[in-house]
Image: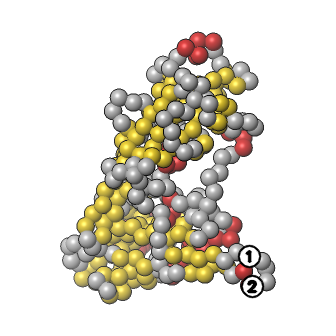
Amino acid sequence: MRFPLILVLVLGVTTGAQAETRLSEGVSLAHGTFSSGGGLTVATEFRRTAQGGTALCGAWAESESQASYTTGEARRIVQLASVYVQGRRVAQDLGALPQIAPQLDYAGAPAGCVLTDLPWRTGRVPEVFLPRQQIAHADEGDGGPHIVFRQTGPGAMGAALEVVPFLRRLSRLVDLSPAVSRSEGRYSSGGGLRVAAELISVNGRAHVCGVWSDLPGQGPRTASLGREILRRTQAVVDGRVMLDDLGELRRVRPRESYAGVDATCLDTGTAWRAGMARQPLRLRLPDLVVYRDTTPEGRVLIRFGPVLGQG
């Protein structure tokens, strides 16, 4: 019961049992990455307390896919983290903040709060420091790899492996036809994503078979977001959503024509009907904020949206 009590004291909430804190659009991010792949992100912001003080509110997330050697290390690193304001340390050990799932945009994400000794002042931005760590050493006698954690990279949006669950894909790849449907989206910061897919019959069931590509021009903040965008992409036939998650499609290099490219297939759970072969497949990409960060230098906002006239 300690955590709800902290929220009551910090934010002046009168109904602690139902109290819930959500991060605002002014959230600040700190990313760290393991050399083996995967990482963590800490999202924080300052809030004014009922007594005129300053609370640090936030949450942290780790990659869904990472090496077994780094399992559990993210929480330990969060406990070693420190928070600074203009060079002054105002908090350390962020282990009391809740762990949440990785987010494209942390605005609105659930958060916990801890008190600091700072008086409230508008415009302050928390700067989280994640210490460099040696996770494993090859000379320890167990033959383990040498893994380093650094405050860099995509953080929780990074992954060690691009895992495609075996039960959702075919045991063989399927060549895409010249009639494959394509759709593109662009990041406001540059670069984008292209997906190509078609609806075919596999063992009497309708499958969405396709691939996707990152497009040139991306920066470090969007380079690892492609599969997350695909998880929010819909495959639509005659107005009906056949699939609302294409994240398990195969990633390939960008090209002008995807005819003949080996594609993975996702089962829609629908029996194949002869008329489906004549119905066009629409690939509906999302329109959303994919990155938001507030730093002492200003705010960063990156959006992703479909290219008009496609999808």
Toward which corner of the image does residue 16 lie, by quadrant?
Answer: bottom left
Q: Amino acid at mark 1?
A: Gly
Q: Nearer the viewer, residue 155 or 184?
A: 184
User: In percent of the image, x 40 and y 76: which residue is there?
Assistant: 128
Residue 97 in the image: x percent, y percent?
46, 71
Q: Are marks 1 and 2 in contact (CB under 8 Å)?
A: yes
Tell me the residue that label 2 is attached to.
Answer: 140
- Badge 2 density bin: few <14, some 14–19, many ≥20, Cα 10 Å: few
Q: Is residue 69 visible?
A: yes
Tell me the residue that label 1 is attached to.
Answer: 144
Q: Is residue 159 left or right of residue 25?
A: right
User: In percent of the image, x 75 and y 37: which residue is there?
Assistant: 171
User: In percent of the image, x 24 and y 82: which residue is there?
Assistant: 119
Mark 1 → mark 2, Cα distance in angstroms: 8 Å
User: In percent of the image, x 66 and y 65: which residue is there?
Assistant: 67
Residue 38 in the image: x percent, y percent?
57, 64
Residue 185 in the image: x percent, y percent?
40, 40
Q: Which secondary structure lies at badge 2? A: helix
